Amino acid sequence: MHVAIIGAGIAGLATAARLAAAGHGVTVLEKDATPGGKLREAVVAGRAMDVGPTVFTMPDVFEDIFAAAGERMADHLAIRRSETIARHVFADGSRLDLFADQKRSERAVEAFAGRRAAAEYREFCLRAKGVHDTLAPIFMRAERPAGPLALVARAGPRGFGGMLRIGAQTTLWRSLAAQFSDPRLRQLFGRYATYSGSSPFLAPATLMLIAHVEQAGVWLIDGGMHRLAEALAGLATRHGALFRYGAAVESVETRHGRVAGVRLACGEWIAADVVVANCDVGALAVGRLGPEAAAAAGPPLPAAERSLSALTAAVVAPAGDFPLLRHNVFFSDNYEAEFTQILRNRTLPSDPTVYVCAADRNERGERPETGPERLFLIINAPADGDTRTFDQREVETCLTAAFSRMEASGFRVDRASASMHLSTPSDFARRFPGTGGALYGRASHGSMASFRRPGARTSLPGLYLCGGSVHPGAGLPMAALSGKLASDAIQADLASTSRSRPAAMPGGMSTRSPATAPSG
């Protein structure tokens, strides 16, 4: 069997490694010059910087990919667990650090907001763990359920009580308001909704499970996050996968009602028994890969249901002596007003919450060198990059507000001496067609949103999906899990086809190596 994978994002890499290790011919077609998709690097002032995801959690998901190929991730990727999760800085100037050690976090919360807050935090951690432990085996790591009833059926009688407690019918913000008496803690834990590109005022309380994922550990990757993409690409290559960079796919081609291959933008035809689309489902839905793929993807996602986009700034600049950690969050004064501007008014926020990854700092905030440092800033933004241009004046106004927000908390960046690489929702819309710049697919707004993400299989035989816009959702671990679900579905369907066609060749389908797959 020959598989063509469109896109070398994390999900595509995970799918490629698993299928190649299982003995299938795999060709990965990537329009860019390097693997990783949204896990990207940029060079600013001569220095490489991560300009995509910066937080690495759930390493077991990635260790499993290497193990499935008979290898150890530790032999190819150096990671170490961080003592700290993040430093949180509030509009009133107060600061709270959270740690990998929950007891240490409890002591920090007590010093920050009192004994009652520490007890509330301890109870919240138990609730977040309960939600995670309930949903991980039956949702996050399992094939997409048809709906809530199917999910309840998976939980079974023993899991029914847990299903009642996960909070799917209330918003994360309402749940946090009932949980925490200190409004700053509501704001801190409400931010976890943005990990899936959603608003805490609209997302279900089930997203509190992200707090448990981080509490279970945040890791640092030596050399930067992009080393993860390189390690996965290397794994797939060692097991026979062929990577073709600068190879943009124009369409998925069919013969006799099923996938037959892909055609590249240069006109080249590549035959394939199976095609895996590791791109945003929105690109398929608007016809970027041809009418057959569009029909299989379903209708385009309405703009109002898209996840958040972002305004990002990769900065190399002299910075003040504020005690940054690797991960830092500077919160706005009014969280609800911020999301009203983004989602209702469709504008960049006038007082944004700013995430800052200080790439030259370790988890304790130590810097081995002096001089300008690498800072990556992320600001939430509306996903309207396909319908309007975020012009220089609007972007500059938001950036000025972001730097002012940090400076009000004591952290000053010398902008006059800074080198900066910006990405706006318009830039993301061009880079990821069909999304408007949405970085996480469908927003997790309402109790049914997660069930509306497509699964690995499509209505077009031979076409499969993986990536952050499909089940189980956005983020590096979830994307990697979608790759596992896609490879599992492909191999299960292949086995089923083999059993139903006893006269076929062994394996049920002809097998071509990537090097000999017909092309023209």
Image: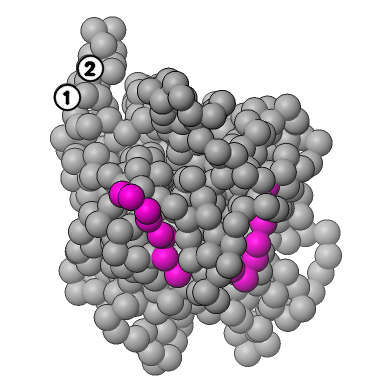
Residue in the image at 42% along x and 91% along y: 392
Residue in the image at 24% along x and 7% along y: 157
The rendered magenta stretch, by its main secondary structure, is classed as strand
**How many marks on residues?**
2
Q: Marks 1 and 2, how far apart in space?
A: 6 Å
Give the residues in magenta: 241-257
Camera-nearest residue between 20 and 266: 266
Residue in the image at 30% along x and 59% along y: 292
**Residue at the extreme right:** 369
Which labelled disc corresponds to residue 511?
none
**Residue at the extreme front:** 503
Q: Measuring from the top left, give residue 222's x and y in whole percent.
A: 76, 49
Q: Does the magenta stretch include residue 369?
A: no
Q: Is residue 218 visible?
A: no
Q: Mark 2 points at which residue?
A: 153
Q: Measuring from the top left, give residue 336's x and y in whole percent.
A: 24, 60
Contact (Cβ within 8 Å) of mark 1 with mark 2: yes
Residue in the image at 53% along x and 65% along y: 269
Residue type at mark 1 is: Leu
* Rendered-image quadrant of the N terminus: top right
Disc 1 secondary structure class? helix
Which labelled disc corresponds to residue 149?
1
Instruction: Indicate left or right for 518 with 125 as reference.
Output: right
In the rendered view, tell whether residue 287 sits above or below residue 281: below
Camera-nearest residue between 6 and 466: 6
Q: Measuring from the top left, give residue 192's x and y in whole percent.
A: 39, 47
Residue type at mark 2 is: Ala
Q: Does the magenta stretch include residue 252?
A: yes
Q: Measuring from the top left, give residue 21's x and y in whole percent.
A: 66, 34
Instruction: Indicate left or right for 247 with 173 as reference.
Output: right
Camera-nearest residue between 180 and 175: 175
